[in-house]
């Protein structure tokens, strides 16, 4: 059975901010990039442990995948069969609060 993918409020806020920022110059590019970020997490439904453990967190359930230039942080909840996307974070911004 596939895991369900959910997005935390901070992740939704991050995604909206990214799309809004890019859309200031090109609305179509902003929407396209937002879709790309969402699509980059879809495969986690079948392979929730695909990403690496986040080195700063040292928690096997907090993982990340990269969609340049963004780090996409997520939490695996095996008991509930859920992947919770925690943050979309630009790599140049340092470490996010998780």
Image (cartoon, rainbow, N blue to C red):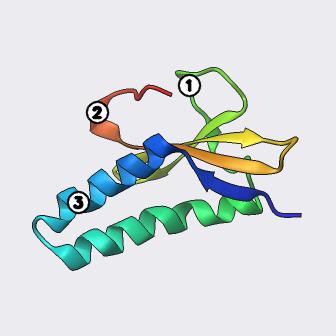
Element under label 3? Answer: helix
Quadrant in which the N terminus is drawn: bottom right
**Residue 43 x/y as whole percent:** 66, 64
Marks 1/3: CA–CA distance? 30 Å
Q: Quadrant of residue 24?
A: bottom left
**Residue 98 x/y as whole percent:** 51, 28
**Residue 50 x/y as whole percent:** 69, 51
Element under label 2? Answer: helix
Q: Residue at x 34, y 75 (%)?
A: 32
Q: Residue furthest left?
A: 25
Instruction: State which tag comes first along the sequence, 1 or 3.
Output: 3
Q: Residue at x 42, y 71 (%)?
A: 35
CB contact under 8 Å: marks 1 and 3: no
Is 4 placed above or below 85 here? below
Marks 2/3: CA–CA distance? 17 Å
Instruction: State which tag comes first along the sequence, 1 or 2.
Output: 1
Q: Nearer the viewer, residue 39 or 21?
A: 21
Q: Determine if residue 72 is in view.
A: no
Instruction: State which tag comes first along the sequence, 2 or 3.
Output: 3
Q: What is the number of the mark on residue 93?
A: 2
Q: What is the number of the mark on residue 20?
A: 3
Label 1: which residue?
Answer: 55
């Amino acid at each position: 059975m596939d895991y369900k993918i959910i997005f935390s409020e901070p992740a939704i806020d991050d995604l909206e901010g990214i799309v809004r920022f890019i859309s200031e110059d090109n609305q179509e590019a902003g929407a396209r990039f937002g879709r790309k970020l969402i699509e980059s997490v879809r495969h986690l439904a079948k392979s929730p442990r695909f990403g690496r453990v986040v080195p700063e967190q040292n928690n096997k359930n907090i993982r990340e995948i990269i969609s340049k230039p963004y780090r996409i942080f997520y939490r695996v909840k095996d008991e509930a069969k859920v992947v919770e996307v925690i943050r979309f974070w630009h790599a140049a911004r340092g470490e996010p609060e998780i």
